[in-house]
Structure formats: structure tokens, C-alpha cells
């Protein structure tokens, strides 16, 4: 049996995308890990699966699996690729696409220039939602192997910890990232963002993603950085987030309203694999 797939990326954050609208997706973590292997498989940060909706008022169900085979709630760069995939494949004619995820319903908009704008919903700072076993506050001091850091914690449909650094190039991502990702205060693990404020409208960012290590770009990580830095009054309502793979435009007017992310999504190649 062969499985058709499309390889896509959003700012270098790369994905294997599978259409499971007609045939159920029934593959476990071990198989996904084999596909994710960059030497012996296809190679990707996440696997995206397009499924029929399970509720009224939406067009598709959007599922995300990390390279380690674990299923997660949300992926911003993946959401943009998801929108381009279903539109380019003719699965929908709509440029406003309503999809369900494990963390709720999101709306994807395909712009005239081919970029995708995503309503990511309102950032949620409630520690119980992440989950994060601390009382609610704006900054949380945590000890790491290289000293104490202060983080902001927010859910963008998945859990994020964001810390401010002087320069992203010299940030100790390879040490602090895995340490915080699996910190016992985050029982479901956490994505870790390292943010450098260039000015109030420009942020440079690196993200260590749970289950995938550092990636070239993380859409929800960019949204989380915006939310935390906005809460700390370090940025304006519209910010350019520069990741190693490229730039995202993030807009948030503050509590009570949704956060918007806009950026590219590109197809790399089509393929088939024996399963």
C-alpha cells in the first residue's frame, strides 16, 4: 500500500501533509517517527493530517503530530500550510476556511498574494490551561542549569514559555530549551521561545519546540512571544517577528480580542511512500 503526501514548509518549519478526508488515518507514533527521520524517511518537523469535520459549522478537522509521534493541539505555521493544501488540492473553493483543532476552532484566510492570515484566538495566560503548576502572574522566575531566568507563560492552543534575551544568536537555546521543555512544572511539556526586542515593532526569536527541538520557525511561538512581550509592555500592537526561517506579521490589540498571524506557506514536492 502506498500513501500519497505533500511536503510543505512555512519559513523552513517543514511538514508532511496527508489528505485523510476519504481514507481514515490510522498510523501510530512508531510509523510517524520513521517518516520524520531525515536520513531514512521523508524528514519533517510535524505531520499534518486533513480529516473530515466532526462537528457542524467547520470544513475540516486539522490534526498535528510532532516528529516524535506525539499528537499536539496547535501549530501556526502548519495552519498556514493546511490552508494552502486544502485550497490548492481543490478540497475547498473558499478562501475563508473554518477548521477544528484539538484546541478549538480556528479560521484561516488565504490572501490575494498567496500568504495566509490566521485568527489564532485570544492568548490565554491562565496557568491551569497550559498546564503550568504555578499561580497566575506576569513573570515566573525559574532556575536553569545556567542560572535563573524569568519567563512568561501563555497558551496559544498549545503551551509556551517565553524569555527575554539580549541576543538570540548567543542565547543558550540548546541548554535552556530542553531543560524547560521537560520541566516538572509543565506536566505536558512546553515550547520555549527566546525573544530579543529590537524595538517596539520588531522582535527576533528562536523557538525550542516540544517533541521537535529547535526549528527554523514556530508560528504559535511567534504568537506567544507577541502575547508575552505585549503583556510586559515591550511591544506595540503590530510586530514583525523575525525567525531563522523568515518573518511573520503578528497583530494583537490586547486582552479581549484575537491575535492575528500572517505569513507564507509553500509546497516543496509531492510524493508517495510505502506503508
Image (cartoon, rainbow, N blue to C red):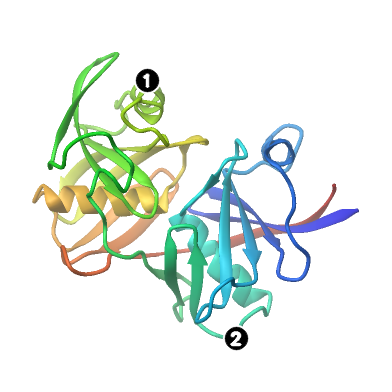
Residue 4's x, y, as percent? Answer: 79, 59
Residue 116 occupies quadrant: bottom left
Q: Is residue 113 above or below residue 157?
A: below
Mark on residue 93?
2
- Residue 148: name its quadrant: top left
Q: Residue at coordinates 64% horizontally, 59% vertically from top-left?
A: 49
User: Left of 64 or right of it: where is 90?
Assistant: right
What residue is shown at x 34% (from left), y 54% (from top)?
156
Q: Is residue 265 visible?
A: no
Mark 2 or mark 1, earlier in chain: 2
Residue 28, image quadrant: top right
Q: Is residue 123 visible?
A: yes
Q: How many marks do you count on the picture?
A: 2
Q: Secondary structure at mark 1?
A: helix
Q: Secondary structure at mark 2?
A: loop
Q: Is residue 98 left or right of residue 69?
A: left
Provide the residue designation for mark 1: 175
Q: Position of residue 159 (x, y in %)?
A: 36, 44
Amino acid at each position: 500500500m502506498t500513501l500519497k503526501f505533500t511536503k510543505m514548509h512555512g519559513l523552513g518549519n517543514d511538514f508532511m501533509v496527508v489528505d485523510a478526508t476519504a481514507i481514515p488515518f490510522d498510523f501510530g507514533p512508531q510509523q510517524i517517527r520513521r517518516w520524520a527521520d531525515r536520513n531514512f524517511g521523508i524528514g519533517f518537523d510535524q505531520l499534518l493530517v486533513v480529516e473530515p469535520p466532526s462537528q457542524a459549522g467547520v470544513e475540516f478537522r486539522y490534526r498535528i503530530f510532532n516528529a516524535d509521534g506525539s499528537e499536539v493541539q496547535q501549530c501556526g505555521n502548519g495552519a498556514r500550510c493546511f490552508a494552502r493544501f486544502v485550497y490548492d488540492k481543490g478540497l475547498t473553493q473558499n478562501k475563508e476556511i473554518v477548521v477544528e483543532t484539538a484546541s478549538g476552532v480556528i479560521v484561516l484566510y488565504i490572501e490575494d498574494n498567496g500568504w495566509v492570515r490566521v485568527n489564532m484566538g485570544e492568548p490565554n495566560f491562565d496557568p491551569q490551561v497550559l498546564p503550568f503548576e504555578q499561580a497566575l502572574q506576569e513573570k515566573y522566575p525559574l532556575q536553569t542549569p545556567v542560572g535563573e531566568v524569568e519567563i512568561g507563560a501563555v497558551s496559544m492552543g498549545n503551551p509556551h514559555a517565553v524569555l527575554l534575551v539580549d541576543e538570540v544568536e548567543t542565547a543558550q537555546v540548546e541548554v535552556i530549551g530542553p531543560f524547560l521543555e521537560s520541566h516538572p512544572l509543565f506536566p505536558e511539556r512546553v515550547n520555549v521561545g527566546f525573544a530579543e526586542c529590537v524595538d517596539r515593532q520588531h522582535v527576533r526569536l528562536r523557538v525550542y519546540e516540544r517533541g521537535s527541538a529547535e526549528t527554523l520557525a514556530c508560528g504559535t511561538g511567534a504568537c506567544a512571544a507577541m502575547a508575552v512581550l505585549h503583556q510586559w509592555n515591550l511591544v506595540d500592537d503590530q510586530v514583525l517577528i523575525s525567525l531563522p526561517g523568515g518573518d511573520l506579521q503578528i497583530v494583537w490589540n490586547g486582552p479581549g480580542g484575537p491575535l492575528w498571524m500572517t505569513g507564507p506557506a509553500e509546497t516543496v514536492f509531492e510524493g508517495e511512500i510505502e506503508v
